[in-house]
Amino acid sequence: MITVAAAHKSYGTFKALDDVSLEIPSGSLTALLGPSGSGKSTLLRAIAGLEDLDAGTVMIAGQDVTRLPPQRRGIGFVFQHYAAFKHMSVRDNVAFGLSIRKRPRAEIATRVDELLDVVGLAGFQHRYPAQLSGGQRQRMALARALAVDPQVLLLDEPFGALDAKVRDDLRRWLRRLHDEVHVTTVLVTHDQEEALDVADQIAVLNEGRIEQFGSPEELYERPANPFVMSFLGSVSRLNGEIARPHDLRLIRSRQQAEAEASSAGVRVTDATVERLVRLGFEVRVELRHTSTGEPFFAQLTRTEATALDLQVGDRVWVRPTRTLGSDQAAPVRALPTEEEFPALAV
Amino acid sequence: MRIARPTRIVLRTLALVYLTVLLAVPIVTILWRTFEPGFGAFWESIRTPAAISAFNLSLLIVAIVVPVNVVFGVVTAIVLVRGRFPGRRLLSGIVDLPFAVSPIVVGVSLIMLWGVNGWFGGLDNVGIRVIFGLPGMVIATIFVTLPFVVREVEPVLHEIGIEQEQAAATLGASRWQTFARITLPAIRWGLTYGVVLTVARALGEFGAVIMVSSGFPGVSQTLTLLVHSRYIDDHNTHGAYAAATLLMFLALLTLLLMTVLDRKRPGQPSGATIAAATAPAEADTDAEVAGADDPAPPGPVASAVPEPELATTTRSSR
Ligand SMILES: Nc1ncnc2c1ncn2[C@@H]1O[C@H](COP(=O)(O)OP(=O)(O)OP(=O)(O)O)[C@@H](O)[C@H]1O
Ligand SMILES: [Mg+2]
């Protein structure tokens, strides 16, 4: 378990970490998620001992490590830009921690082979980092960090420098690896999809504070505040309410829409179809409030879209099947009623 | 930028003429004059006791100056690149001072400091003769060669950044282990060039050394001083050419040695070794490097079933 208590860190007058407390359970994979500059790396580096805190404590596995240098914290760290030892072969890179610990040669050789096997670099022992692709370099860095059997594995945007496809593959692979190895892992990312995809828990950071900490499910379904809500997954604002775009139902007939809405106790929004974008088997329908002109969008499956037979310019009635609450951050004006604006009547 | 053909020819000719007149002609002339009377005469004139002593003294100075500059140069470079303290700019400027100050001024100021009547002149009373002795020549040479190692190592330190060192720290390496196993190998080539330049300059230094040397042939003459005294005092032009050729030969040897070492670079693969190492698994690498189709990295679980490419896989939770 990693415990961070009341951590503060300032650069000049700028607060990079502002009273951060966090408990990361043993054996879990936790993501630190937040926009650029929110203090994710600072927090991770403070756990690693690469950054000193101004105040607060860090405990790893019950031991107070606040004053310990990184060498003695029992960690493995993976950097965004690999930090490969350029003048060493893949084998020597992975063996580094073990050879520092003066392990017998035979033991080192066995362990390195084993790890290179795990990360899929078995045939690459004698290459140099310059001869590897980015994805391979990062897997080497991971093997290097795992070689010393760390108590915790800390990854700072490990896949940030890779292209989308490789990144997807690697993060699924990391998840499977974690399920095998069970080392407590903290992953920094600014990509909400990555966090939702791999993490058991997500801590959402913003301006040096933790906005919410919980399972992906919790954060997605019950966001604590508008920031978390709009940072995790996209949202559509309609009628002063916020809903996930896939929780919007588009209905062609007004009567039907109002009947459904009144039984569900929600309001119906009148909108015009602006654009249809097909993303794999999902369809994104870009809409505009007929009266206010506010843009928003809904996400349908291809089947639903086909059944509705939508065309650009069509008028539809939208009702949320589930809302996340009202929109305090940016309230949208309530829709005018028919009495105020008779032209709305069809 | 595309340059018209006639312009290109003119530019090339200019560059060639410039190099020939200013570099090649003087060197060839000296070589010519040295070996004109035959190799035997050259050999004779560099085997005189004065020449042998000058040769040894020059090498001795190099042998002292190089390690001193390596140690302090590397430390200074690390302080300049990694340090965050007020006055760093100033320190950086001071390092460049020897480039700006004429060697003769260095000589004069050393005499002022260390001479019998200088601030530290008291050392003379306890039998340590700095000026007109070996220490003076060494100090003068250190002064003029000081920037080379610093300036060659600095950009390399900048370039490698601190992540490799931090990675080593997280893997358990102490500061010293990190320096020896990560930093030093990484700056090795910058350091090497710094040393080459230091050696060349130390061998060739004249202005500062002549001020602080007593200049007795066979005792306190370096090779450059020997060339000078043979030419000016003894009117022995051939002897001067021969000593000059010997100096050039030493400098050339240094360059050659470094080139050979460079070829043997362990670690950093040269072009040839890359090709050799890549050959066996070529297909695999090409695909990965091009990012065309990185095969799902083999891992603890069998490789993943290709999943449909979705922008929003995780959200289809309705
Ligand atoms: N050494 C430093 N000196 C001054 N300010 C710093 C320093 N390191 C970080 N900061 C500031 O602290 C804040 C948090 O930085 P941090 O690196 O933790 O952000 P991050 O969440 O990792 O962002 P990113 O996703 O861009 O990596 C940033 O605003 C940054 O400008
Ligand atoms: Mg960061």
Image: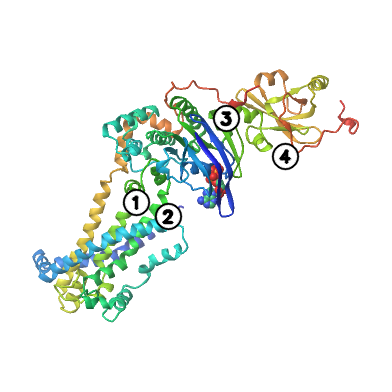
Crowdedness near tag 4: few (<14), some (14–19) or many (≥20) residues, C-alpha within 10 Å:
few
Q: Is residue A275 visible?
A: no
Q: Secondary structure at mark 1?
A: helix
Are tags 4 and 3 found on a single chain? yes
Q: Position of residue A96 (x, y in %)?
A: 34, 39
Chain letter for mark 1: B
Residue B255 versus residue B42 in the image, above or below: above
Amino acid on which disc 1 is placed: Ile
The label on residue B115 is none
Q: Looking at the picture, which amino acid does disc 4 mark?
A: Ala
Count neighbours of disc 2 (C-alpha within 10 A) and say few if under 14, some if 14 to 19, many if 20 or more.
some
**Which residue in the protein does label 2 denote?**
B82
Upstream in the sequence, badge 2 or badge 1?
2
| Subunit of label 4 | A
Q: Amino acid at mark 2?
A: Arg
Number of callouts in the render?
A: 4
Q: Is residue B280 left or right of residue B311?
A: left
| Residue at the limit of the structure toward the bottom, as seen here | B117
Q: Are marks 2 and 1 in contact (CB under 8 Å)?
A: no
- Amino acid at circle 3: Leu
Q: Nearer the viewer, residue A234 or A285?
A: A234
Q: Are marks 2 and 4 on the same chain?
A: no
Residue receiving disc 4: A329
Q: CA distance from mark 3 to mark 1?
A: 42 Å
Residue corresponding to mark 1: B187
Quadrant in the picture for residue A6? top right
Q: Is residue A92 above or below residue B179?
A: above
| Parent chain of label 3 | A
Residue identified by numbered label 3: A196
Q: Is residue A68 left or right of residue B187?
A: right
Residue displayed at 44% across by 62% down:
B88
